Image (cartoon, helix red, strand yellow):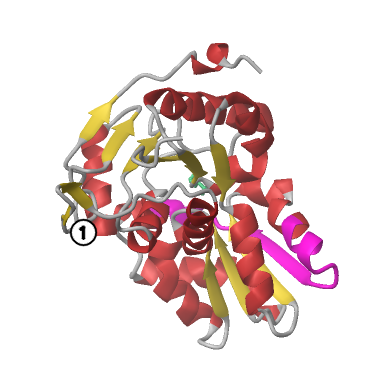
């Protein structure tokens, strides 16, 4: 496997940029190729069969472009489709559920953990199961917060509307006295301040994207797949910036909107952004 290859990341849309941001911060020498399936978002309200099909198509698309590792940034796809993805690509695949669950179990002191995610992720019970594998006595309460996705994309993360919606969604979690909360959806780190304010500063928030970035650091080292330096020529390190032209972004629709929301989330829009069609990739799945 070639160390120079980029790391592939896919999400149902723009939210996975929070995972890209965490990976970029943890791995400044690496290059990334990101696919946002903006034509088919949301995944969080769809069935297992549909999410699996979309996730396999996205993964095949990135794999055939040449990547050394695939990060499934989308919590819903990670919760529902990892086994299907792993059958269809030739690289290691890391989802965000297990790293998030691990970080939560490490952080909790009372063994009471909240998880907020999309409806499909909550219904799958993927976080509860992953947490139970690590600590069978941990108590987990999960709640879907679908409107957080729109609030983040609209740029209303710090608004009265966000505060009142957060108070409503997080009421049961707050009453159940959790000490740790997993932000189990790509968009939720954008609302981090409002969520923290609603639950109180004593509750530890776990960003599963950040936890995943630490996993990827370890995996690249273990497999000897990390790029050696940031130098593109003659070992001269080039300063990396989020969304610079060393990273490439694909979307399946609405590239202009993706760029606008990326600017809102990250402070800069992708320099290298391309709209593509990816349908039919699953026909290539040989295994
Ligand atoms: N990216 C999705 C996730 O993390 C949220 C948006 C969607 O529903 O597709 O679960």
Q: Kindly identify the residue that appears in the image at 64 percent across and 38 percent down.
A: 82
Quarter of the figure with the C terminus: top right
- Give coordinates of residue 22: x percent, y percent: 39, 60
**Residue 172 seen in this snapshot:** no
The residue range painted magenta reads 130-151
Left or right: 129 in relation to 262: right
Q: Which residue is mark 1?
A: 267
Q: Residue 184's x, y, as percent?
A: 57, 58
Note whether 124 is above or below 60 in the view shown. below
Question: Which image quarter: residue 264?
Answer: bottom left
Residue 150 at x, y = what percent?
A: 40, 51
Local SS, label 1: loop
Quarter assignment of residue 92: top right
Which residue of the protein is positioned furthest toward the right in this rendering? 137
The answer to whether residue 265 of the structure is visible from this angle is yes
Q: Residue at x 56, y 27 (%)?
A: 89
Q: Is residue 198 magenta?
A: no
Residue at figure coordinates x 69%, y 72% from the top left: 105
For image coordinates 27% across by 37% down, the residue present is 248
| Residue placed most toward the observer, 194 or 112 | 112
The quarter holding residue 266 reads bottom left
Q: Is residue 77 left or right of residue 277?
A: right
Q: Nearer the viewer, residue 156 or 100?
A: 100
Residue 136 versus residue 176 in the image, above or below: above
């Amino acid at each position: 496997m070639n160390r120079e290859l980029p790391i592939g990341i896919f999400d149902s849309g723009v939210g996975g940029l929070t995972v890209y941001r965490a990976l970029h911060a943890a791995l400044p020498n690496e290059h990334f190729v990101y696919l946002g399936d903006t034509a088919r978002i949301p995944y969080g309200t769809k069935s297992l069969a549909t999410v699996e099909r979309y996730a396999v198509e996205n993964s095949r698309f990135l794999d055939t472009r040449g990547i050394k590792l695939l990060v499934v940034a989308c919590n819903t796809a990670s919760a529902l489709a990892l086994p299907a993805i792993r059958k269809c690509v030739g690289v290691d695949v890391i989802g965000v559920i297990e790293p998030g669950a691990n970080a939560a179990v490490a952080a909790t002191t009372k063994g009471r953990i909240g998880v907020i995610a999309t409806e499909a992720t909550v219904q799958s019970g993927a976080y509860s199961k992953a947490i139970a594998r690590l600590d069978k006595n941990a108590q987990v309460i999960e709640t879907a917060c679908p409107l957080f996705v729109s609030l983040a994309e609209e740029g209303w993360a710090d608004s009265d509307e966000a505060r009142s919606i957060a108070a409503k969604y997080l009421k049961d979690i707050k009453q159940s006295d959790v000490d740790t909360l997993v932000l189990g959806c790509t968009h939720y780190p954008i609302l981090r301040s409002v969520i923290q304010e609603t639950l109180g500063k004593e509750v530890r928030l776990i960003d599963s994207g950040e936890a995943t970035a630490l996993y990827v650091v370890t995996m690249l080292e273990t497999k000897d797949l990390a790029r050696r330096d940031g130098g593109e020529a003659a070992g001269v390190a080039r300063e990396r910036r989020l969304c610079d032209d060393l990273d490439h972004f694909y979307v399946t629709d609405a590239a202009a909107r993706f760029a606008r929301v990326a600017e809102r989330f990250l402070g800069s829009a992708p320099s290298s952004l391309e709209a593509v069609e990816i349908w039919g990739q699953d026909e290539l799945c040989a295994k």
